[in-house]
Image: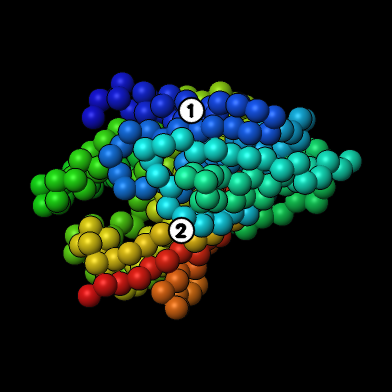
Amino acid sequence: MTEANSTDAVEDLIQVLNLEQIEVDLFRGHSPDVSWQRVFGGQVIGQALVAAYRTVENRVCHSLHAYFIRPGDPKIPILYKVDRSRDGKSFTTRRVVAIQHGQQIFNLAASFQVPEQGFEHQAAMPDIPAPEELPSERELRKAVAGKLPEAIAKHFSRPRPIEIRPVNPQHYIDPEPMEPVQHVWFRARKEVDDDIALNQCILAYASDMTLLDTCVRPHGVSWVSGKLQSASLDHAMWFHQPFRVNDWMLYSQDSPSASGARGFNRGSIYTRDGRLVASVAQEGLIRYHD
């Protein structure tokens, strides 16, 4: 994969997030042609946040809460209908429903705030190796590509807009049980302008990457085996401070619990200089078919 292909993938992501307005509070989004069975959850989160932002002025998203209801079909457009729930003096609330084949596939509630100053504190960033000291996810996947089914190998090798460098990677094919904790450095592969909304929407997209894997780590199973059925069920995100997605950020993740064929995951996202800029929580389906 060339550097040009990588930067083109960022442009493609920005275009995927650039929804078409077809009526007041109604938007249409498309999926990239990646030959995969369903729409990536992070794409739907990012597009829904874009739709909400298109109905808000001079306010910044501070939280979102979303549910995945049905798998998204990558072959047809997704309609996003925005409900203007409330416009207050300090806070604005929006609800977004994503529709395909006449049915809800996803919904999201987001809250926006007029920027203001207040008390500040944060949890410290973990002390871990710098991204330059680590192999990229691309290098790790290339090492096992020859042992994978053709469809998965092709999916692994496609250009990606987000560069990932895992600190404590688990083997893709024969994973040993590990603690339900992982740390991942990531960044957009191309310079992105400093628009807060765009950076938040790209981070929302990236926040669904690797997170669900955390709750599977203790169980020594691989999704490439075809025996693990997994899917995001819900996703919550809180934005604490501004950031730039083209700078290295650390995604520090843990899974406190798995039960009932569901796994619960948490994530803290830090800038390289240690600022906590976002927090994430997600529950996902993890069903094993022996």
Residue 20, horizontal then vertical, whole percent: 56, 26
Q: How many marks?
A: 2
Q: Is residue 59 left or right of residue 37?
A: right
Q: Is residue 94 left or right of residue 2?
A: right
Toward the viewer: 266 or 290? Answer: 290
Type of the residue with mark 1: Ile
**Residue at 71% over, 33% down:** 55
Residue 33, horizontal then vertical, whole percent: 33, 33
Q: Earlier in the sequence, mark 1 or mark 2?
A: 1
**Residue at 30% over, 72% down:** 288
Toward the viewer: 68 or 124? Answer: 68
Toward the viewer: 7 or 100? Answer: 100
Residue 198, horizontal then vertical, whole percent: 58, 31
The quarter of the image holding the C terminus is bottom left
Residue linked to disc 2: 232
Mark 1 crowd level (few <14, some 14–19, many ≥20, 10 Å Cα)? some
Q: Secondary structure at mark 1?
A: helix
Q: Quadrant of residue 137?
A: top left
Q: Quadrant of residue 157?
A: top left
As drawn, the label of residue 14 is 1
Q: Is residue 116 left or right of residue 11?
A: right
- Examine the rendered structure and indicate whether residue 124 appears above or below residue 28: below
Residue 155, horizontal then vertical, whole percent: 25, 42
Q: Quadrant of residue 75?
A: top left
Mark 2 crowd level (few <14, some 14–19, many ≥20, 10 Å Cα)? many
Q: Is residue 172 left or right of residue 46?
A: left
- Examine the rendered structure and indicate whether residue 262 appears above or below residue 131: below
**Residue at 50% over, 64% down:** 283
Q: Is residue 235 visible from the viewing direction of this image?
A: no
Q: Is residue 145 visible from the viewing direction of this image?
A: yes
Q: Residue furthest left?
A: 146
- Examine the rendered structure and indicate whether residue 208 appears above or below residue 288: above
